[in-house]
Amino acid sequence: MILQAGAMAAAAWFIDADPGKFSDDSAAIVTCLRNSARMSVKGITVVSGNVWARDGSRYVRETLRAVGRHPPVHLGSQRPLVHTPEMAKRQGELEFAGAFGEPEPQPGRETAVDWLIGELERRSASILAIGPLTNIARMLEKKPAIAARIEKLVIMGGAVDVPGNVTKAAEFNFWFDPEAAQMVFASPVRKILAPLDVCNKAVVDKRRFDEVAAVDTPVARLYRESFGNGYPGFLTKPDARTYLWDELAAAYALDPSIAVKVETRRLDVVTELGPRYGAVVQGPHAVEVLLEADTDRAWEMTKAALIRK
Ligand code: RIB
Ligand code: CA
């Protein structure tokens, strides 16, 4: 490929996601794919979280058809390292149980971990991880040396100085697989966390929803249907609100200059089953934490990608 003078080759990235039916994961994937001058998406690996990974794989393919881009998609871990639906039931009232609240399908052929190892052996790249960290932890466990091939790992997950969104203590991605989050924190990979602390400031309300829903493109139609009639249901609940979660992490991965405040913290993840399962606590592992960002710019980047013809 011949680059114009001054032009830079787009950085290689993999996306590890748990997309529900056109969810925040899907919007994040669309945003990455539609910024190909900054990010060259080499593939998408799917993990259970919002839904079982097999369903997530179907949803991601539906999104890719709407975008007209077809990077490789690989099915990843059906179950977290330790957490099970039975354990989730023993934890009392939960805001959201994701896949654990749905019937579990027969496992499919899980190729994501080996495929990702093979790809990273060929070239170093960064990873945007916007679901539970099961695939990433299993990859690091299977091939610890692969850590040196990961330039950076941008993670949406955790609640550092704020309450959780599944339990009082834990954010969903970390709650779904706390052992994986802990293993990733303990790895030597450079980790940048976009936790609820910053995402809570990136509100998506009906006014923002309408900016996308008014547009008639395949992607905007998927967004309208899902965010309008599914979660959070803007078409029937005009006061509903949601947040840029995975989209904010994607916007940061695409353009780190949206960061306003990043602090390196020493952290760990609670893995004792109980009310604080999946909580982020002080610990030994260095993690760069995105605490404030230009959330308006993150929304503009997301919106531009969603409404593009
Ligand atoms: O807590 C937010 C995270 O959990 C996001 O990755 C979202 O997709 C979800 O369900
Ligand atoms: Ca997600």
Image (cartoon, rainbow, N blue to C red):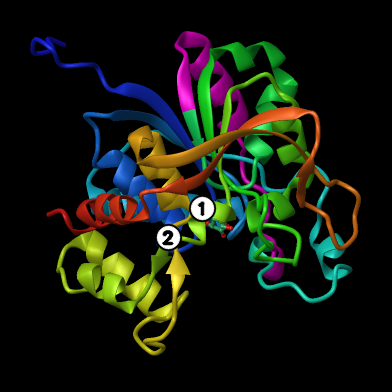
Judge whether 25 appears above or below 4 on screen: below
Give the amino acid type for the residue marked by disc 2 in the picture: Ala
Give the amino acid type for the residue marked by disc 1 in the picture: Val
Which stretch did the figure color magenta?
A: 100-126
Decide which of 127, 251 is in the foreground and name it: 251
Q: Position of residue 125 (x, y in %)?
A: 45, 19
Label for residue 198?
Answer: 1
Determine the residue located farthest toward the left in the rendered image.
4
Q: Position of residue 248 (x, y in %)?
A: 42, 49
Decide which of 190, 76 is in the foreground and name it: 190
Q: Position of residue 293 (x, y in %)?
A: 42, 47
Judge whether 241 appears above or below 84 on screen: below
Q: What residue is at 33 percent from the left and 74 percent from the top?
A: 225
Q: Residues within 10 Å of mark 1 (few under 14, many from 20)?
A: many
Ligand 1 within 8 A of label 1's CB? no
Residue 132 appears in the picture as rendered: yes
Q: Position of residue 281 (x, y in %)?
A: 78, 45
Residue 112 is left or right of residue 95, and the answer is left
Q: What residue is at 58 percent from the left and 23 percent from the top?
A: 190
Residue under pointer 2: 202
Label for residue 175?
Answer: none
Q: Is residue 107 magenta?
A: yes
Disc 1 is placed on an element classified as helix
In the rendered image, which quarter is residue 288 located in?
A: top right
Q: Residues within 10 Å of mark 2 (few under 14, many from 20)?
A: many
Q: What residue is at 25 percent from the left and 59 percent from the top?
A: 219
| Discs 1, 2 touching: Cβ within 8 Å | yes
Spatial distance from mark 1 to mark 2, Cα to Cα?
7 Å
Residue 29 is left or right of residue 308, and the answer is right
Decide which of 216, 66 is in the foreground and name it: 216
